[in-house]
Image (cartoon, helix red, strand yellow):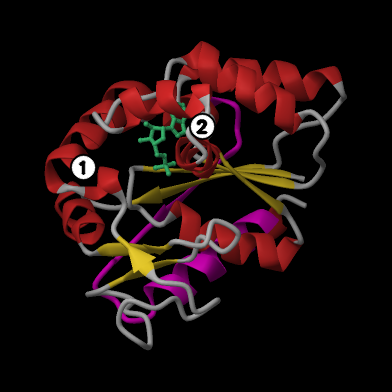
Amino acid sequence: MYIIMLGAPGSGKGTIGKEICNKFNLVPFSTGNMFRDEIKRETELGKKANEYISQGNLVPDEVTIAMVQEQLSNLENVLLDGFPRTINQAEKLKEILSKTGKNITAVINLRVPDEDIIKRTASRVVCTNKDCGASFNTIFMPPKKEGICDVCGAPLTVRDDDKPETTKKRLETYYNSTEPLISYYEKEGLLEQIDIDIYSPTTKEDTTNKAIEAIERRL
Ligand code: AMP
């Protein structure tokens, strides 16, 4: 099974994606996490990627596709979070999967108004333990103990690219490069739209349930 999570930065792809992975036993595949790991390890790829990420831009397709191609071809039952982000990447993904006779099961698009995105990313905190990667929100989904991850107990931190100036640029990048994927996957008959109300106290559960139902309808 191959599930794609779509949505603007801060729409909750990582959080909801984790729940979907638990439900269907999928391997999470997050290009953002892969890049952050490369940056932390100060690899050549990490240094190159950071030039783009820190400015709120996309890492060039050739760099991203090379990394994905190497790691994705051996995996089955995957949830893709943050890939594809351009039409070119989507075409490439189709090609990689079709070589081994695999298909995308569903594309889940999380729809959140821009002003809510800015509010949400400004208060997002993430776990510093890269094997955990849990995400919290000091306003909407606070950890039980301030600054500490509920899941593994590691310290929480603010992502560098969650600063308001970078978020604005990331949103602009999203509209220019990634939003066209919504109609691309709609035409492919794979799109499932979910509207998110970030002010609802049950937003995580509601969104997770809607996404699970949408996937089950397609199995
Ligand atoms: P994310 O954690 O998915 O929000 O990704 C963080 C940043 O990594 C993005 O803002 C991009 O700069 C970069 N990135 C992640 N995935 C991709 C991708 N598929 N193509 C290009 N850049 C990406």
- Residue 126 drawn above or below residue 187: below
Quarter residue 217 falls in:
bottom right
Q: Which residue is drawn at 32% across and 64% down?
A: 125
The picture quadrant for ligand 1 comes to: top left
Q: Label 2, on which residue?
A: 186
Q: What stretch is highlighted in magenta?
A: 186-215
* Residue 190 percent across, percent down from the top left: 60, 37
The one nearer the camera, 31 or 15, is: 31
**Nearer to us in this view, 204 or 105:** 204
Tag 2's secondary structure? helix
Q: Distance between the residues labelled 1 and 2?
A: 26 Å
Amino acid type at image mark 2? Glu
Nearer the observer, disc 1 or disc 2? 1
Q: Give x and y (percent) for residue 197.
A: 29, 66
Q: Is residue 89 above or below residue 161?
A: above
Q: Which residue is drawn at 23% across and 60% down?
A: 120
What residue lies at 83% left-to-right and 17% top-to-bottom?
99
Q: Looking at the image, which residue is at 58% across and 62% down?
A: 18
Badge 2: residue crowd in 10 Å (few <14, some 14–19, many ≥20): few
Q: What element carries label 1?
A: helix
- Under mark 1, the amino acid is Thr
